[in-house]
Amino acid sequence: MLLKFHKNINETGTDEAGRGCLAGPVTAAAIILPEEFQNSILTDSKLLSHHKRITLEPLLKSECISYGIVHIQPKTIDEINILNASILAMHKAIEQLKTEPSHIIVDGNRFKPYKNISYSCIIKGDSKYTTIAAASVLAKTARDAYMLKLHEEYPMYNWIKNKGYPTKEHRAAIKKYGPTKYHRMSFKLLADDPSK
């Protein structure tokens, strides 16, 4: 059973998707849920089927107090590194909220202060707190939809299936066709690339 709030009822949960990918953006979402919100299937997006995530997405958007979703592109990831890009994405997602939160809860163990708002980093927070789980679903569904559009431009990498993650098939396509403008050049794109 997920806990609703960590400290305050007007807190936002934030999470990212796509951190370990070789291609595409890192995507973050932030969401504030009302105190009365309940949902029996909501949990960490990684534990949900695609169908359940797609079902939850419009429900979360319609029932929340406010939400924000942001993509940070590979060029920026390469410039500032994936950790800083992930935190930047979360900051920008929080910035989109129409209501300023009283507290921020973050999935994982790394974050940087946002304005003067207090925050807590929670390991596996997406399987403990409703607001982080909700943010994980919004980040995942938004990024999946984004990768579907990129797949239409570069179908040979099969991003519709692997979403940019380092599968054998994805790496074989990189070896055959080379990287695209959507690949993260600071990442080890090929398994046998000793320079990364």
Image (cartoon, grey):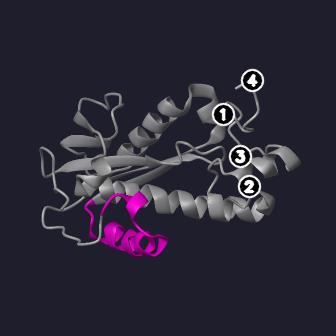
Determine crowd level at label 3: few under 14, some 14-19, many 20+ residues with C-alpha closer than 10 A: some
Q: Amino acid at mark 2?
A: Glu
- Residue 98, can we see it? no
Pick the residue in front: 124 or 58: 124
Provide the residue designation for mark 2. 169
Q: Nearer the viewer, mark 3 or mark 4?
A: 4
- x, y (%) of residue 176? 87, 49
Mark 1 near mark 3, Cβ–Cβ under 8 Å?
no
Pick the residue in front: 12 or 66: 12
- x, y (%) of residue 163? 62, 57
| Separation (CA) of disc 3 from disc 2 | 17 Å
User: Which callout, 3 or 4, points at the residue further toward the start of the chain?
Assistant: 3
Mark sitting on residue 136? none
Provide the residue designation for mark 3. 182
Mark sitting on residue 187? 1
Kindly report the secondary structure that dominates the magenta region of the rendered protein. Answer: helix
Q: Nearer the viewer, mark 1 or mark 3?
A: 1
| Separation (CA) of disc 1 from disc 3 | 12 Å
Mark sitting on residue 195? 4
Which residue appears at 59% of the width and 34% of the height?
Answer: 77
Q: Nearer the viewer, mark 2 or mark 1?
A: 2
- Residue 77, can we see it? yes
User: Which callout, 1 or 3, points at the residue further toward the start of the chain?
Assistant: 3
User: Which callout, 1 or 4, points at the residue further toward the start of the chain?
Assistant: 1
Q: Residue furthest right?
A: 176
Q: Amino acid at mark 4?
A: Ser
Q: In the picture, residue 55 is in which quadrant?
A: bottom left
- Quadrant in which the C terminus appears: top right
SS for dot 3: loop
Which residue appears at 35% of the width and 67% of the height?
Answer: 61
